[in-house]
Image (cartoon, helix red, strand yellow):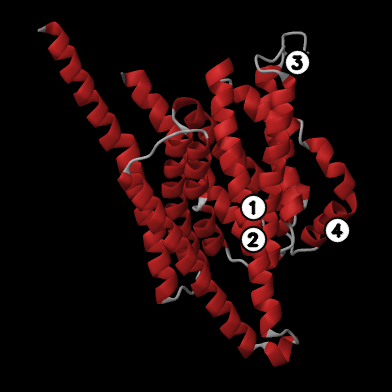
Amino acid sequence: MADIILASLNTVGLIFGGCCSNVFTLEKIIKTEPDSGLLITLSQFIFTALLASFSQLTPTLTLKTPAVPMRKWGYIALMFFAVNMLNNWAFAFNISVPVHIILRSFGSVTTMAAGALQGKRYSALQVGSVVILTLGVLVSAFADAGSKERRATDTDTSQGKSVETSTGDLGSGLLILLAAQVLSAYMGVYVQDTYATHGSHWRENLFYSHFLSLPLFLPLTSILRRQYTALSSTPPLSVPDSLPVLKSANLTQGIAFLLLNSATQIACITGVNLLSAQASAVTVTIVLNVRKLVSFVASTVLFGHRLSGMMCAGAALVFGAGALYGWETSWRIPMTRKKEQKGENEKKAQ
């Protein structure tokens, strides 16, 4: 029992500590250079693939024979690459980090839809909470669009941008995030089915989903070079004399936060994969929604984002519905099933 509790605490620590720190470093990069999504994704993939490779090497430094067919890992890697590219690309379309967090919580809806297509059934409370969550996402998106429109109107003369350009950018960003969530939901169900068939080989998934994605960056070399140059041109990182190794590296602020972002991403994704191996796809989605709430509050407080009353209402609907769904899925339904099973066993005993 103690081992189970310790493992659960370890998983929660990796998810909340790693993922929330990752959002902080992400916002630092976005504040400096919004169009850095591709470079952020590549850096995360390289770091994670290198670290995850140790679990897949034999004593002779050759790769172990995978327990899951390579064609499945290749398919998962392709989807994983696309989801991460879309999520990070959205930052180039005038979407703030808090709004990004809210809209990515829409994953509960797409996960349920994917499960329903596979024949899974959901309770009335589960469906109702997802309806509320959807309403919250729509309210948040509408509120953000309104605030972007007002800011565009105020700065139209000085920046030479029209209201239509601002709202058009936002609409494109919303569509990109929606596509990412739909694909992510399908990928989550596919991974869950893969685990059910071949076992929960999450370390293999961690390695191959990143390693097999690296060649997909090759056609994008020119964009990566431009984004790296932009981050390299940021002010130098202030390092105390007590850290001579870092001081001699002469890192800029942009590159330093890029490296920190990749390091925290490793902790975050390790926790998510541990949770995926222990729980259903929907439960994983709900736990991540709670983590996103923590990140949302931290981002708003630390970076001084201005949130309208409508935006706060939308966020409350999203995270409240997520909590309701989590209670229904992870507590009430399992307890009801246990009671029913107990009653059936007692009848058989009589």
Residue 249 x %, y %: 77, 47
Where, by quadrant of the figure, is residue 309 drawn?
Answer: bottom left
The residue depicted at 31 percent of the width and 47 percent of the height is 125
Residue on which the image places disc 1: 179
If you read the primary sequence from the N terminus, does the residue marked by circle 3 or circle 1 appear first?
A: 3
Does residue 243 appear in this view? no
Residue on which the image places disc 2: 175
Give the quadrant of the N terminus. Answer: top left
Residue on which the image places disc 3: 63
Asked if marks 3 and 1 touch (Cβ < 8 Å), the reply is no
Asked if marks 3 and 2 touch (Cβ < 8 Å), the reply is no
Point out the frontmost of discs 3 and 1: 1
The alpha-carbon separation of the residues under discs 2 and 1 comes to 6 Å
The alpha-carbon separation of the residues under discs 2 and 4 comes to 25 Å
Number of the label disc, if any, that sits on residue 226: 4
In the rendered structure, which amino acid carries the disc numbered 2? Leu
If you read the primary sequence from the N terminus, does the residue marked by circle 3 or circle 2 appear first?
A: 3
Asked if marks 2 and 4 touch (Cβ < 8 Å), the reply is no
The residue depicted at 68 percent of the width and 81 percent of the height is 164
Where, by quadrant of the figure, is residue 339 drawn?
Answer: top left
Vertical side of 123 occupied by 97: above or below: below
Asked if marks 2 and 1 touch (Cβ < 8 Å), the reply is yes
The residue depicted at 68 percent of the width and 27 percent of the height is 207
In the rendered structure, which amino acid carries the disc numbered 4? Arg
Vertical side of 272 occupied by 200: above or below: above
Point out the frontmost of discs 2 and 4: 2
Point out the frontmost of discs 3 and 2: 2
Residue 59 x %, y %: 72, 8
The alpha-carbon separation of the residues under discs 3 and 2 comes to 39 Å
